[in-house]
Amino acid sequence: MMAQMVILTLPRALECCSRIGEVLDFSPTIADRTGERVEEKKDCKDVLTFKNVSFRFADADEYTLKNLELSCKRGEITAIIGGTGSGKSTVASLMMRFNEVTEGALLLGGVDIREMPQSQLREHLSFVQQRAWLFSGTIAENLRYGNPDADDKQLWHALEIAQAKDFVEALPDKLESFVAQGGTNFSGGQKQRLSIARALVKKPELYIFDDSFSALDFKTDAALRKALIPETKEAAVVIIAQRISTILHADKIIVLHEGEPVGIGKHDELLANCPIYKEIYDSQTKEASENE
């Protein structure tokens, strides 16, 4: 019986070893050209700039993103909206350099991000993704992930801005409350607010919110966005959203359709001049009125 068990287990073990070997031998497709830090241009007004950027996956025939021109300036909120598959999240992945630009250039502080180490690039960014993820440990440890030197006062301030202070104060251990791997002991809205607070504690030059308000109710969403404006006035903010209500007061809205920008402007301008934006707006306001 033991011999039979070994014979049955051995092929599985060999297959597992083969898969582990593939992981250990894998080389990242995006590698730093140099490990040395690059000097950034101090007089550059734009935090991040897309210069005629196009992107195509290696195994794809068509471009996912085409001819994107975009400047993210300090003190401004730039919003990106579009239908499913329009390339919104691809913009965020290019900003984080999870994918490499196929054509054109992406500049941080006037320097091509391909010329600087990835660690240097990400020092300037805070990224809050749609599916909020928390690490195992305590709330305080999660919030200090991007800024280990932050004190409790800074943590509570970030929680207040992110509309998370009330529910954290209600916990028995408050900042020292336990967080399960992935934050499974919190609701979706609570995880999103904690993720936003973690981004605020870091105090970066560029905030990227990739549909980060989707799990929040409209009242909390509005209160959070209002509180964010003074808190991020020294930084650039990019909001990638599906709900138009989230981006109504953005300084600049980029409308994507099938990977191409089809409209750039403020809400009222796009409503009058961009059919794609008006179509999205009409569908969402109609859906909201039907739900009422």
Image (tube, helix red, strand yellow):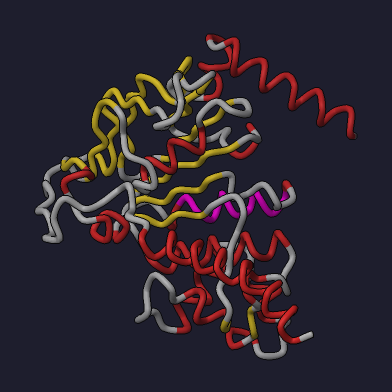
Check the picture and name the quadrant holding the C terminus.
top right
Percent position of residue 51, x then y: 26, 27
Residue 221: in magenta span: yes
278 is higher (above) or lower (below) than 169: above
* Residue 264 seen in the current view: no
Residue appearing at x 50%, y 48% in the figure: 209
267 is higher (above) or lower (below) than 24: above
Residue appearing at x 29%, y 41% in the figure: 48
Percent position of residue 183, x then y: 65, 71
Nearer-the-camera pick, 69 or 114? 114
- Using residue 284 as the reference point, say whether residue 43 is left or right of it: left
Q: Which residues are magenta?
A: 219-229
Percent position of residue 165, x then y: 63, 72
Residue appearing at x 59%, y 18% in the figure: 277
Residue 31: in magenta span: no
181 is higher (above) or lower (below) than 176: above
Q: Main secondary structure of the magenta part?
A: helix
Check the picture and name the quadrant holding the N terminus.
bottom right
- Using residue 169 as the reference point, say whether residue 142 is left or right of it: left
Residue 137, quarter of the rendered image: bottom right
Residue 49, quarter of the rendered image: top left
- Using residue 221 as the reference point, say whether residue 196 is left or right of it: left
Percent position of residue 246, x then y: 61, 39
